[in-house]
Image (cartoon, rainbow, N blue to C red):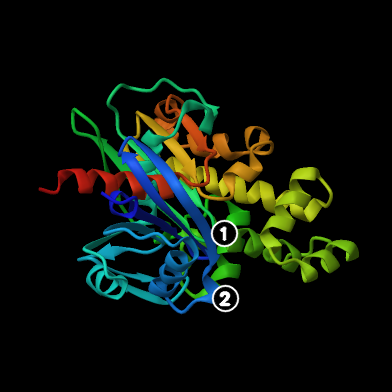
Amino acid sequence: MSESAALILAGDIGGTKSNLAFFRGASDAPESVAERSYQNREFTGLAEVVGRFLADTGLSAASACFGVAGAVVAGASHLPNLGWQLSENDLACELGMESVRLLNDLEANALGIATQPPEQFFTLNPGQPLAGGNQALIAAGTGLGMALLFHDGAEYRVSASEGGHVDFAARNEEEIRLLRFLAARHGRVSVERVVSGRGLEAIYDFLKDSGMDEPAGLAARLEAAADRAATIAQSGARGEAAICAQALEMFLSVYGAAAGNLALMGLATGGLYIGGGIAPKLIDALPNSGFMAAFTDKGRFSGLLSRIPVRVILEPRTALYGAAAHALRQSVSKP
């Protein structure tokens, strides 16, 4: 058997970039052979990205699994933040592969949790986990994703969702004003409009519109920034500008409330995981923020929420490893 024949291709296809890798080994411990990351704006579709990766590495595989930032229905997906239309059958034909599987990116992320060692998790709340209890995953980045994990007696199975697109639930007067501000821009306001990179930018714009001072130096930095949300978060975490600190605190509080809602819906007594690209960059700010207070502020269920472990996933490639684990498991199960 050639090296390529023993490989599977896995991908984490986000709203901004695509992370691709060839893997081999066991599904519970995928071994990366070659990895690359590509900016999606430079390509017209996933097949083109994968084609570049195959050319760059000189490797190939008979099967692939991609976690994608969109709902997957009957083997097809539309990626709302990119406008790409994907199909398992079309991708298999275009790439010359025997099989291609599409998973929601949060499903891939959830599958990747079991592949990560303990040091890849930051504990925000140790809680009191119940063995075999349901688990949940929430992840803010370019967008907002959610997934639930149910234990079948032997292992956790993942239920994908599009929970990031549920209605934003304002909890106080300031958030009601934020809701009105966003409704004037977008009409319907989903929780993703607030809990995401663009959501942090929107909160900042709302506070500025409400009359908070924007220092001249900060305005210039934001104008020149390739990533406004990162600049706002960094400035807020360092206490460099009151408007950034307020935006970051409001963002983390809403994030915590959304995570608590998900934990309630899934009765996640086994733990709540925070994935995505934003949380690991805010590890120093999270413990002293209003995230956990908002997470547990659920009235008669506050006690239950306080006992749910909350952990941040530190490994940015968890979804990539989850897609690899799925592909390797499928390759073993083939006759």
Q: Residues within 10 Å of mark 2 (few under 14, many from 20)?
A: few
* Quarter holding residue 228: bottom right
Mark sitting earlier along the chain (1/2): 1
Numbered tag placed on residue 143 in the rendering: none
**Percent from the top left, x then y, of residue 99?**
22, 62
Residue 148 in view: yes
Q: Is residue 118 left or right of residue 150?
A: right
Q: Name the amino acid, label 2.
A: Arg
Label 1 sits on a secondary structure element that is helix
Q: In this rendered view, identify the residue nearer to me: 94 or 106.
A: 94
Q: Name the amino acid, label 1.
A: Ile
> Which residue is label 2 attached to?
185
Residue occupying image coordinates x 27% and y 26%: 132
**Percent from the top left, x then y, of residue 296?**
49, 34
> Which residue is label 1 attached to?
176
Query: What is the number of callouts on the image?
Result: 2
Residues at badges 1 and 2 in contact (C-beta under 8 Å)? no
Residue occupying image coordinates x 89% and y 66%: 216
Q: Residues within 10 Å of mark 1 (few under 14, many from 20)?
A: some
Label 2 sits on a secondary structure element that is helix
* Quarter holding residue 129: top left
Q: Is residue 270 left or right of residue 201?
A: left
Residue occupying image coordinates x 59% and y 49%: 278
Residue occupying image coordinates x 55% and y 75%: 42
Between marks 1 and 2, how big is the CA–CA gap?
14 Å
The correct choice, above or below, for 106 with respect to 68 in the image is: above
The correct choice, above or below, for 39 with respect to 261 in the image is: below
**Percent from the top left, x then y, of residue 20?**
45, 57
Q: Nearer the viewer, mark 1 or mark 2?
A: 2
Q: In this rendered view, identify the residue nearer to me: 283 or 207.
A: 283
